[in-house]
């Protein structure tokens, strides 16, 4: 490397450091700003805020999740959409650290008292979760209100650990949920005795009058 | 006179000029066989001809070899249009509508009535699939049901006519193709533009090199609507089985912005204009470009999302699909640049919509194909060329009587591929899925068109499937 190249490299490194610091500062500011805007009842303020929430990253996860239960359904919806923006921004190729940071913030939310939060967080983790998310997600296979979302979300994990979690859940599941778990296990190449597929078994009768002729 | 359906406003027009002439409505069996034979030579599927039990005349009824016994799953919107047409075919001895199914009891009662109460009503389509006397089903449900119901119907040995787009995920599309081929059934997607006369004209004109090598196809379509008056979740209306309406989708409370009629504007149940009309306009593009069995290598979407409301599909969007070997580019532009139809008087007389279509850019010339669903119109030069094509001109698939339903009947009868066959329909749906996926992820996607999978993006790869809610699974 010659002198000019050295100088250029130094300048570029300096610029990169400055940019990173500026980005961190912008992020630090942007979380409070983001939350304030998501709380706005003006969709011209709230809409652009959730749409550009992606780079806010992990620090914005908990405050946004808290807003998902806001009594104003448009604010709650905007918070949910902002969270998905964060998840999908963090899930981009080459951003593993960001994805891990977001995952770390999402996992505790699986214990939220709010069903919609548990449900949506399961689906968010289905997109970017690592094996670390599997056990806490599988714990919700015993949660009657979101167990089906937990089963579906775990199906997106390619690892054996997810299969093992489904197997363990099957062993202790109530009878009515065993059929769904058996379906999942078979799809993942596991042999399951009993609990045949229910997908072609009709269950719902119409009240509309029957045919006069056939 | 048959009803005509205008997808743009979901209204029936019983006084509109029918697409079939009186003479074609009373198509002679001899002519039917003649036209069927033409297609047999062109596109044999390679599996034994399937002639359903009820179509071989065992009961001695009128023209049994041309009659299919049908069940209709989903009878609102386009499903209602299909039912009306099949009832009209029944009057000519071509079909027997024996079952109707809908999750909305009011709609179901109306559908049964349309058949003169001859069809047995069902809420749960799986009762309908159990019937051994049904040869085929017509699926007109919201998009999120298309793949699951097609796969289940195939597994029960029924031929399928299913509304477009074929599927909501890559996994669903692959399952549809496998189920159709494993069970040797004929699937026709409702991308009926391919059966329209002037779409055939455009295809044949381009296939014979009149505009040179086509390197770019640009589609235009007006924007998706916004939900400007959001409303809270509520109890579903009486008579609607919300659990069955949702089917494979994750559970959520009812909201009147989902249905009836507005499922298209939700990403998970519809996907917006790109999936609705894109499944027409881009289906035509794949057909004309001879690209039904391939796909792009990259997809990049940008767009504008609504700031509020339940509807979450893009208001505006632009998607660039890059194909290789041969190299060409397909773009979806919403709204893009609308090309006005060239003849105002004809446009007025025929009610030609110009809000969507595609321009085929060749290295010698270009050609416009307007609309491309229940209507299709092209330029005068292509129409005139088709009236007197040069000797030896290459031909392309021609649906009997320019009728998409008849093309399906013919394929069932002859064991051939219909024009919007399952592979083609799934290839088109994949374009729409990848466009929306690129948009919501905010990044370019790389696609392996041979393996049919996303490359180099773990999150996007996981989103190639959306596991279905039990028991409404593939």
Image (cartoon, rainbow, N blue to C red):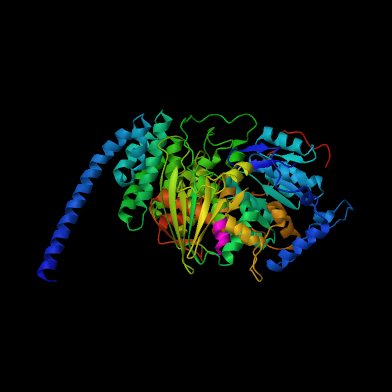
**Residue nearest the viewer, comparing A208 with B86:** B86
- Indicate the quadrant where residue B42 lies: bottom right
Q: Residue at x 45, y 48 (%)?
A: B336
**Residue reaching furthest to the left:** A3
Q: Position of residue B115 (x, y in %)?
A: 77, 39
Residue B32 seen from this side: yes
Note whether A24 is above or below A188 in the view shown.
Answer: above
How many badges with numbers are in the image? 0
Q: Residue at x 46, y 47 (%)?
A: B334
**Residue nearest the viewer, comparing A14 with A141:** A14
Specify whether A144 is left or right of B407.
left
Magenta-tinted stretch = B284-293
Residue A43 falls inside the magenta stretch: no
**Residue reaching furthest to the right:** B60
Specify whether B36 is left or right of A162.
right
Q: Position of residue A9 (x, y in %)?
A: 15, 63
Specify whether B59 is left or right of A154.
right
**Residue nearest the viewer, comparing B53 with B278:** B278
- Indicate the quadrant where residue B117 lies: top right
Note whether B164 is above or below B291 in the view shown.
Answer: above
Residue B157 seen from this side: no
Note whether B439 is above or below B10 in the view shown.
Answer: below
Q: Residue at x 59, y 55 (%)?
A: B380
Q: Position of residue A189 (x, y in %)?
A: 56, 60
Note whether B159 is above or below B364 in the view shown.
Answer: above
Specify whether B468 is left or right of B157.
left
Q: Position of residue A114 (x, y in %)?
A: 43, 35
Residue B288 falls inside the magenta stretch: yes
């Amino acid at each position: 490397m010659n002198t000019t190249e050295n100088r250029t490299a130094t300048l570029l490194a300096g610029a990169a450091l400055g940019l990173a610091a500026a980005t961190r500062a912008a992020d630090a500011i942007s979380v409070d700003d983001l939350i304030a805007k998501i709380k706005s009842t003006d969709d011209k303020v709230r809409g652009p805020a959730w749409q550009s929430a992606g780079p806010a990253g992990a620090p914005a996860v908990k405050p946004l999740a808290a807003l998902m239960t806001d009594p104003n359904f448009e604010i709650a919806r905007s918070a949910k959409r902002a969270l998905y923006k964060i998840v999908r921004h963090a899930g981009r190729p080459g951003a593993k650290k960001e994805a891990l940071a977001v995952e770390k913030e999402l996992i505790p939310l699986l214990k939220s008292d709010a069903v919609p939060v548990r449900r949506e967080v399961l689906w968010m983790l289905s997109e970017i979760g690592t094996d670390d998310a599997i056990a806490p997600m599988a714990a919700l296979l015993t949660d009657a209100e979101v167990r089906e979302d937990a089963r579906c979300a775990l199906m997106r994990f390619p690892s054996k650990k997810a299969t093992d979690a489904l197997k363990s859940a099957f062993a202790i599941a109530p009878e009515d949920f065993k059929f769904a778990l058996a379906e999942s296990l078979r799809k993942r190449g596991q042999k399951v005795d009993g609990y045949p597929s229910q997908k072609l078994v009709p269950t719902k009768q119409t009240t509309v009058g029957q045919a006069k002729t056939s | 006179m048959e009803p005509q359906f205008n997808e743009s406003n979901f209204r029936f027009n019983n006084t509109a000029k029918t697409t079939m002439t009186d003479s074609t409505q009373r198509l002679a069996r001899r002519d039917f066989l003649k036209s069927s034979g033409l297609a047999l030579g062109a596109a044999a599927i390679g599996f034994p001809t399937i002639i359903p039990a009820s179509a071989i005349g065992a009961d001695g009824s009128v023209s049994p070899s041309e009659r299919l016994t049908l069940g209709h799953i989903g009878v609102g919107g386009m499903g209602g249009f299909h039912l009306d047409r099949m009832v009209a075919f029944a009057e000519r001895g071509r079909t027997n509508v024996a079952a109707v199914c809908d999750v909305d009891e009011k709609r179901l009662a109306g559908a049964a009535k349309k058949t003169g109460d001859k069809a047995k009503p069902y809420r749960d389509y799986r009762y309908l699939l159990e019937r051994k006397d049904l040869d085929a089903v017509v699926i007109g449900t919201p998009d999120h049901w298309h793949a699951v119901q097609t796969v289940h119907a195939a597994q029960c040995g029924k031929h399928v006519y299913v509304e477009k787009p074929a599927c909501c995920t890559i996994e669903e599309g692959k399952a549809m193709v496998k189920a159709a081929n494993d069970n040797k059934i004929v699937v026709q997607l409702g991308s009926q533009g391919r059966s329209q006369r002037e779409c055939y004209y455009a295809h044949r004109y381009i296939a014979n090199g009149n505009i040179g090598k086509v390197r770019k196809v640009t589609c235009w379509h007006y924007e998706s609507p916004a939900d400007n008056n959001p409303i809270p979740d509520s109890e579903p209306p009486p008579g609607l089985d919300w659990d069955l309406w949702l089917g494979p989708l994750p559970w959520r409370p009812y909201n009147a912005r989902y249905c009836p009629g507005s499922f298209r504007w939700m990403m998970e149940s519809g996907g917006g204009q790109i999936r609705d009309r894109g499944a027409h306009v881009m289906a035509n593009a794949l057909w004309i470009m001879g690209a039904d069995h391939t796909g792009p290598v990259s997809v990049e979407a940008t767009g504008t999302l609504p700031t509020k409301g339940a509807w979450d599909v893009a208001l505006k969007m632009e998607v660039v699909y890059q194909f290789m070997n041969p190299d060409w580019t397909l773009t979806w532009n919403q709204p893009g640049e609308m090309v006005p139809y060239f003849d105002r008087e004809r446009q007025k007389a025929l009610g030609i919509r110009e809000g969507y279509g595609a321009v085929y850019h060749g290295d010698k010339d270009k050609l416009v194909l307007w609309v491309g669903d229940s209507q299709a119109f092209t330029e005068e030069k292509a129409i005139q060329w088709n009236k007197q094509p040069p000797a030896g001109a290459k031909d392309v698939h021609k649906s009997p009587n320019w009728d998409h339903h008849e093309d399906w009947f013919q394929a069932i009868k002859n064991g051939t591929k219909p024009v919007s066959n399952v592979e083609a329909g799934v290839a088109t749906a994949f374009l729409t899925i990848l466009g929306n996926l690129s948009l919501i992820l905010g990044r370019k996607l790389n696609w392996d068109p041979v393996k049919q999978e996303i490359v180099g993006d773990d999150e996007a790869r996981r989103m190639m499937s959306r596991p279905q809610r039990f028991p409404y699974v593939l």
